[in-house]
Image: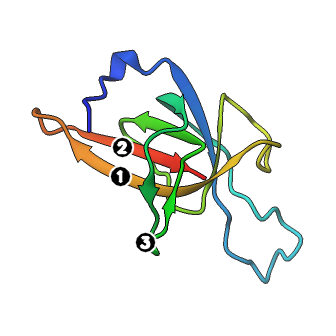
Amino acid sequence: MSRVRGRFLKDTVTRWRETPYNAEAPYASAWGEPIHYPCNFMTGGSVQRDREGGEFQPLTTYRCKEIDIAIGDRVAQGEFYDLTPVEGAETVKKTATGSTLRGSKDFNVYTG
């Protein structure tokens, strides 16, 4: 994995995570607050393997520093404040973590 330097993270990715069912608020939003992360992105990317071992061609690859994005979350390139994922948001199929020579973590997020 290549090194991702914080100062080169010129784009933004917005993440929505599905919240667990709450019996006390059955009509509450099923999605948590949108969270924004600085990143770099590219359309496509090399063929990846998901959790089940199946191969897929990513729709978008995001490279970030410190993030909290998990498989199954919905992401979209840009800064959005909608409480539900926007049209065109993609589902995260794989995340990968690496580290630079200095020991800081880099994250790749693949959507499909």
Mark 1 = which residue?
A: 96
Left or right: where 42 falls relative to 76: left
Whole-angstrom CA distance, mark 3 to mark 2, is: 20 Å
Left or right: where 21 falls relative to 61: right
Residue 43 image position (x, y, % from top left): 57, 32
At horizontal 58% and vertical 34% (from top left) the residue drawn is 13
At horizontal 68% and vertical 64% (from top left) the residue drawn is 18
Identity, as a three-letter code, of the amino acid under mark 3: Gly
Identity, as a three-letter code, of the amino acid under mark 1: Ala
Residue 3 image position (x, y, % from top left): 25, 29
Residues under numbered marks 2 and 1 in contact, where contact means CB atoms less than 8 Å apart: yes
Q: Earlier in the sequence, mark 1 or mark 3?
A: 3
Task: Please tell me whether mark 1 or mark 3 is closer to you in this view.
Answer: 3
Mark 2 = which residue?
A: 107
Residues under numbered marks 1 and 3 in contact, where contact means CB atoms less than 8 Å apart: no
Residue 103 image position (x, y, % from top left): 13, 39
The label number, if any, that marks residue 76 in the structure image: none
Task: Please tell me whether mark 3 or mark 2 is closer to you in this view.
Answer: 3
At horizontal 79% and vertical 48% (from top left) the residue drawn is 83
Q: Is residue 30 above or below residue 38?
A: below
Mark 3 = which residue?
A: 53
At horizontal 83% and vertical 74% (from top left) the residue drawn is 25
Label 3: how many residues lie within 10 Å, few (<14), some (14-19) or many (20+)? few
